[in-house]
Amino acid sequence: MIQLRDYQQELINDVRKSYLNGSRAPCVVLGCGGGKTVLFAYMAQQSQEKGNTVWFLVHRTELLQQTVDTFDKFNIERKTIHIAMVGTVSRNLSKYPKPDFIIFDECHFSAAKTWRKIIDAFPDAKLAGLTATPTRLDGKPLGDIYDDLVEGESIGSLIKKNHLAPYKYYAPSVADLSALKKKRGDFDKGQAEEILSTKAVFGDVIKHYKNYADGKQTICYCSTINHSEMMAKEFQEQGINAIHFDGDTPKKERKQIIKDFRKGEITVLCNVDLISVGFDMPDVDCCILLRPTDSTALYIQQACRALRFREGKTAIILDHVNNYERHGLPDDEREWSLGDKYEKPKRFQEDGTLKIKQCLNCFGVFETGSNSCPHCGHEVELVKQELENIKEIELKEIKRKKKEEAEKIVLDFRSPEECKSLAELQAYARNMGYKNGWAWFQAKARGLVN
């Protein structure tokens, strides 16, 4: 029997209301680690008990087994519930009983042809999309597929309520990525590999791991398979038990790797994007980001892998590619939409200062609000760009005030002699079309300025 948490039950009720209000396909949002699979296992069970045929579809082999394990854990019979992979079903639509209800796990992938094929084949079936990041990887909205956005607890709220672990975020730079170019909507993986695959970079990554997370079970996100293999080798040469695996790793071997990692026999698991979405790893204490991405969805999925709750745990996120500058922190409150493209947060506040600061002493990253680093206590000073922003804002304010003062002057002077100040002479000159220096010359001649 599934016992839902309060926020999960509330979200289920909101989804029901969505259907009652005429929605066919709500997109259901719940922060990473909020228990989305459990939530929809419950919904699938409820739908089955009403006599419906339910498809619960995932997009990767690991997620398939995790979903089956969740159903088995709660002793949910699968009489008319069919758990399968999107790709398999899309190629064999006629082999499955016609669905009344289709649940798509990690539905931000729904725009792909295989997903759309299933959606278009059953226009009478109700849909439910499930995700922590309701936007495509390129930031485009999902409103052409889903018709209602039903939002549950955010990542920040789940942390505050002890459903997710708190974290410390560090961003020690290991390479200059300023020349990195984009390719097919994201940063060029091959170019990123080339920049991030030097001995110096490998050395710095491992040094910072030992400094901040030594011995902690870690997922390391790399730019390419080759990069991941090299990173695992470098960890091994430093006496750290690391291994690489990817989508081409044989199924049996992948299963054993995950099993060994869960048992703690592997310390660092290197991959590209394999462990980005829905991957249940409750014992991960650290994430290393070596995969620069322009996708907020991918960033959140990767950075949050270490946030599974455990009593007394504080997760560590090591961002060596400055993803936080592009996307903010993982638990920032974000405005999602089914109709508008997701807009990345602005780096600077209205007063010209950074929204997120970095300590130059310990490389800790945190939200603005204190003059000292919450990680090490070091005083945090304004950086060059902040000083320039503040100066520019002050100059604009001075110009604005001068303009307002000038506009307040009543232009009813018949001659320059009636003007009693430089400002009045300047207003008179503007009204008469005189050159800029005329007012100053007149004011000086009459002793109005020194």
Image: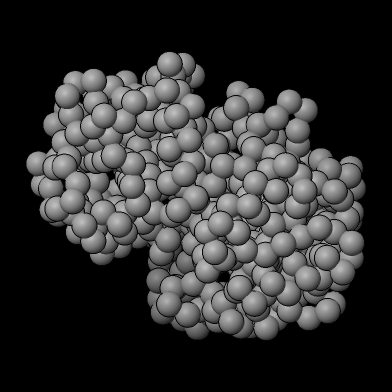
Q: Quadrant of the C terminus?
A: bottom right
In this rendering, the count of numbered labels is 0
Q: Is residue 136 left or right of residue 176?
A: left
Residue 368 in view = no
Q: As displayed, is residue 185 above or below residue 254?
A: below
Residue drawn at (21%, 57%) of the image: 92
Residue drawn at (30%, 62%) of the image: 112
Counting from the top left corner in percent of width and height, residue 34 is at 51, 33
Q: Tell me the quarter of the picture where residue 411 sits.
A: bottom left
Q: Is residue 228 left or right of residue 23?
A: right
Q: Residue furthest front?
A: 252
Q: Is residue 234 left or right of residue 85?
A: right
In depth, the one of 431 and 360 nearer the eye is 360
Residue drawn at (48%, 66%) of the image: 427
Q: Residue furthest left?
A: 124
Q: As displayed, is residue 446 above or below residue 312?
A: below
Counting from the top left corner in percent of width and height, residue 378 is at 90, 48
Q: Quadrant of the N terminus?
A: top left
Residue drawn at (49%, 27%) of the image: 73
Counting from the top left corner in percent of width and height, residue 114 is at 27, 61
In depth, the one of 306 and 425 nearer the eye is 306
Q: As displayed, is residue 203 above or below residue 239?
A: below
In depth, the one of 356 and 389 nearer the eye is 356
Q: Is residue 355 left or right of residue 363?
A: left
Counting from the top left corner in percent of width and height, residue 166 is at 70, 35
Residue 5 in view = yes
Q: How is the image coloured?
A: one colour
